[in-house]
């Protein structure tokens, strides 16, 4: 009898949560998302932001949310661009 001894590449790292396998990347993303939401919710004061010419006063949670969304969009764009190469 012959055995298939060819090594197969390892799949992504996973952890089991309530009987379900989850990728570590997914778990890390969920933890970071929860921390970001908590941080945004904890910072509700108003801030003054000076854009080149105008000065804008906004609640800090709006500034943090916009910053988070722009960062996520840039990260997705760069990840997709890298995958195409």
Image: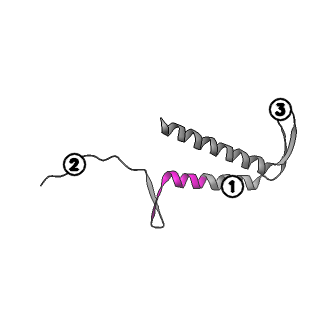
Residue visible at 14% across and 52% down in the picture: 2
Q: Residue furthest bottom?
A: 18
- CB atoms of marks 3 and 2 within 8 Å: no
Left or right position of 7 against 36? left
Quadrant in the picture for the N terminus: bottom left
Q: In the image, is 60 to the left or to the right of 35?
A: right
Q: Is residue 78 above or below residue 24?
A: above
In the picture of the structure, the residue carrying the numbered disc 3 is: 52
Report the mark closest to the observer, 3 or 2: 3
Q: Which residues are magenta?
A: 19-31
> Which of the numbered marks, if any, corresponds to residue 25?
none
63 lies left or right of 3: right
Q: Earlier in the sequence, mark 1 or mark 3?
A: 1
For disc 2, the marked residue is: 5
Q: How far is the residue under mark 1 from the one under mark 2?
A: 47 Å
In the rendered image, the residue lying farthest to the left is 1
Name the disc covering residue 37, or none: 1
> Could you tell me residue 79's position as x and y percent?
54, 41
Q: Is residue 66 magenta?
A: no
Could you say where residue 63 lies in the image, as x and y percent from the top left?
Answer: 77, 46
Furthest-top residue in view? Answer: 52
Dot placed on the residue nearer the N-terminal end, 1 or 2: 2
Seen from the viewer's position, the closer of residues 61 and 42 is 61
SS type, badge 1: helix
How far apart marks 3 and 2 lie (CA) works out to 64 Å
């Amino acid at each position: 009898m012959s055995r298939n001894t060819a090594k197969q590449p390892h799949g992504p790292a996973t952890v089991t949560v309530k009987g379900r396998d989850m990728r570590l990347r997914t778990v890390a993303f969920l933890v970071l998302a929860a921390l970001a939401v908590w941080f945004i919710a904890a910072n509700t004061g108003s801030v003054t932001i000076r854009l080149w010419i105008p000065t804008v006063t906004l609640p800090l949670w709006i500034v943090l949310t916009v910053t988070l969304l722009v960062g996520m969009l840039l990260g997705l764009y760069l990840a997709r661009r890298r995958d195409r190469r």
